[in-house]
Amino acid sequence: MKEKLKQVKILTAHHHSSYWCRPDKSPSIFLPDLITLDIQVDEEYYNHFHDRTRTPAPTTNSSCPLLLELKPKNLVVRMDGFERVIYGYGGIPSGIFDKVINVFLIQRVGIGDIAYFDPYEGLPKPPPSRIKSITIIYKIAPGCTTSAEVSMKQRRNGNRYAKLQKMVEDLGDSEITLTIVLQRYLNDGVEEEMQQAIETHLDGLPEKWWPQEKKERRKKMVEVLSLERWVEERRRWEDKFDEHEVWCWKDEGGIL
C-alpha cells in the first residue's frame, strides 16, 4: 500500500459530509510525492469542505483527516459559490499551505460579476509567504442561484475591480506573481479593462510607500491572459492539471 501511495501525484478531493470523517471512519493518509491537490468546495456547503448542517456538527478542530497530512506544492481550489472558502475549520486545515508554491482559484461567476469578485475568498489573508504564484481562472456561469444573486447585488455597490486592485496592492512587497485567465465568452475589451484598472490603481498609490520603480515592478508581475493563450503555454498548467481536462477547456471555449 505504501508503494502505491507514493505513486499519487495529483489528488482531487470533493466536499462531503463531516460524518464521513469521524476518527473511527477516516484515518489520515500521507502522500509523500503529491504534487497537486485539487479541492472542490460547493455553495451548498457555504464553501466549507465539510457540510455545516449534519451531525456531528463541525468544530474548530474538524479538519478533514483526508487532508490533514497532505503537503502539496500546487493547490487548486474550485469555488462554485460566492462565500469565502474556510480554512482552519470547516474541513480544510490551515497547514495545507505549508509547502504550497502555486495556487489556482477557479471561480464560478456570472459574466457581469467578474469585476466584483474578491480573490481573498479563495485564500487566507494575507497569502502565505511561501506562495510564488496565484492564478485566477474565471468559470463563466450561465445562471446563478438565489443566494449568489443576493450576494452579488450587494457587491455591485462597490467600485469595479476594487477587490482585485486591493490584492495587487497587498502583494506589493512579495514575490508573488498574479495571473488572471479569461474565457472567450467574455465581452470584447474585458481583458484590457481589467489590466487598465490594475495599472491605474498602482499609478495612483502614494510615492512615499510606492516609488515608481516598485509600481513598474509590480505591473510586470500581473498578467491578464486569454484562456487560449494560457492553455497553449504548457508550463503554466503542466503537472498541475489533468491534460485532457485543460485541452477540453480550450476546445469548448471555456471551463464546463
Image (cartoon, rainbow, N blue to C red):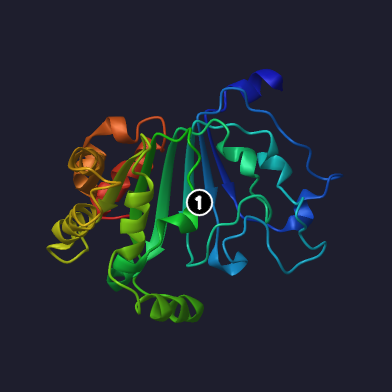
Along the line of sight, which residue is nearer the eye, 152 or 25?
Answer: 152
Question: What residue sits 67% from the left and 52% below the top?
Answer: 91
Give the secondary structure at mark 1.
loop
**Relative to 20, does residue 108 appear above or below in the rendering?**
below
Q: Is residue 30 left or right of residue 255?
A: right
Image quarter of the N terminus: top right
Question: What residue sits 48% from the left and 49% below the top?
Answer: 77
**Relative to 106, does residue 75 appear above or below in the rendering?**
above
Image quarter of the C terminus: bottom left
x and y percentages locating residue 182 in the rendered image: 25, 54
Residue 55: quadrant of the picture: bottom right
x and y percentages locating residue 74 in the rendered image: 47, 35
Q: How many marks?
A: 1
x and y percentages locating residue 209 in the rendered image: 30, 46
x and y percentages locating residue 44 in the rendered image: 58, 68
Along the line of sight, which residue is nearer the eye, 8 or 63?
Answer: 63
Residue 237: quadrant of the picture: top left
Mark 1 highlights which residue? Answer: 125
Q: Is residue 214 left or right of residue 136?
A: left
Q: Is residue 28 left or right of residue 124?
A: right
Instruction: Give the residue furthest to the front.
Output: 208
How many residues crowd around disc 1 within 10 Å: few (fewer than 14), some, or many (20 or more)?
few
Question: What residue sits 48% from the left and 54% below the top?
Answer: 122
Q: Amino acid at mark 1?
A: Lys
**Relative to 226, does residue 28 appear above or below in the rendering?**
above
Question: What residue sits 70% from the left and 20% below the top?
Answer: 2
Instruction: Give the residue furthest to the top.
Output: 3
